[in-house]
Amino acid sequence: MQRASYASVFVASILIIAKFVVGLVTGSVAILSSLMDSVLDLVSSVINLVAIRQAVQPADIQHRFGHGKAEAIAGLLQAAGIAASALFILFQAVERLITPQLVEQANVGIMVMVFSTVMTGFLVLYQSRVIKKTMSLAVSADSLHYKGDLFTNVGIIIALILVGYWDLHWADPVMAVMVAAYLGWNGRTILMEALDVLMDSELPEEERHEIVALIKENDHVVDVHDLRTRSAGQTVYLQFHIELSPDISLQDAHNISDDVEDMLFEHYPGAEVIIHSDPLGVSERRDHFIDEDTEA
C-alpha cells in the first residue's frame, strides 16, 4: 500500500509542475482547474501515505482494536479538501463565463494533457492491482481521484481543441464547471465511505448472508443469530451467536467455535471473530440486540 502512495505522490508532483507551466502559458481555466485537481491529488496522496503508515501499525495498549480507522479519518480530510477545491474552480469558471478571456497556445495545452492522461492511466492500473490485494479504503479513495482525472483530462483536451481550432472560447470555462461538479461528486462519495467506517456501518447485506451461510456449513451449528459486522482498514470484525445442541460438553462447544472461526479466517484473513455459543432453546437477554426478520 505504501508503494502505491509513493507512486501517487510522484505522479501528482510531475503533473503539477507540467500543468502549472502550461496553465500560465495558455491562460486556460480548464487547465488551471486540472492543476488544482492535481494539487489536491498530491495533498490526498500525502495524507494517504501518513494514514496508511498509521493504519498498518499493530494494536497497542491504548488502541487494542488497532489503527485501521486512520484511513477513514484521511478520507474525511480528503473530502473536505475536494469540496474546497470544487468551489474554488466553480467560482473561477463562472467568472470566466461572465468575463471571457482568450486561451493562447492551445496546442501546448493539448500535448501536456495527453501526457497527463498517459501518466494517470499507468497509475490507475497499478492502484487497481493494489486495491484487489489489500481492499484499502485510502488507496481506493486515491484511485477514485485519478480515475476521474482520466475522464476530465479527455474533456479538457476536447475543450482545448474547440478553443484552438474553432475559437469556441466558452468551452474552456464550461469544462472547468464540469470538473468542479465531478470533484464535488467524488468528495461526497469519499465522505460517505469514510463515515460508514467511522460509524461502524454493517457490511453489505449480501455479504452478511454469505457469512451466515459459511457458518452454517458446520453441521453442528443449528442456527445463527445476532450477527454484527464492521470493518476498520483491512480488518473485518464479526460477532455473532451460534445455537448448539444442549447435550454437548463445553469442550465440544469450544471446538465447534474454533472450527467456525477457522472457516471464516479462510475467507477473511486477519479478521477478528467473537462467537457466543447458546444451548438450543434457551432464552437470553436481548437488551443490546436488534430483532430482525432475517436469521442474522
Image: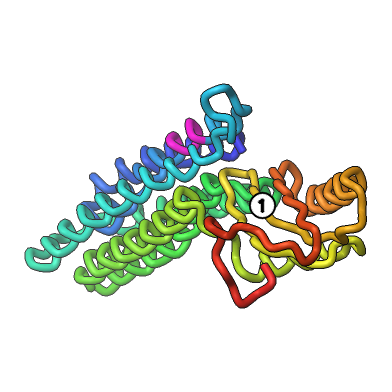
**Depicted 211 relative to depicted 65: above or below:** below
Foreground residue among 5 and 69: 69
x then y, percent, for residue 81: 31, 46
**Depicted 284 relative to depicted 293: above or below:** above
Q: What element carries label 1?
A: strand
Q: Does the magenta stretch include residue 278?
A: no
Q: Residue furthest bottom?
A: 293
Residue topped by disc 1:
239
Write the residue at 38% across / 47% down. 76
Q: Do we see residue 115 in this rendering?
A: no
Q: Do we see residue 102 in this rendering?
A: yes
> Quadrant of residue 222 in the image?
bottom right
Write the residue at 41% across / 51% down. 112
x then y, percent, for residue 272: 69, 43
> Could you tell me what secondary structure mostly forms the magenta stretch?
helix
Q: Quadrant of the C terminus?
A: bottom right
For badge 1, the amino acid type reads Gln
Foreground residue among 70 and 142: 70
Task: Give the magenta part as a residue range.
Answer: 46-51
64 sits left or right of 94 in the view: right
x then y, percent, for residue 142: 49, 48
174 sits left or right of 274 in the view: left
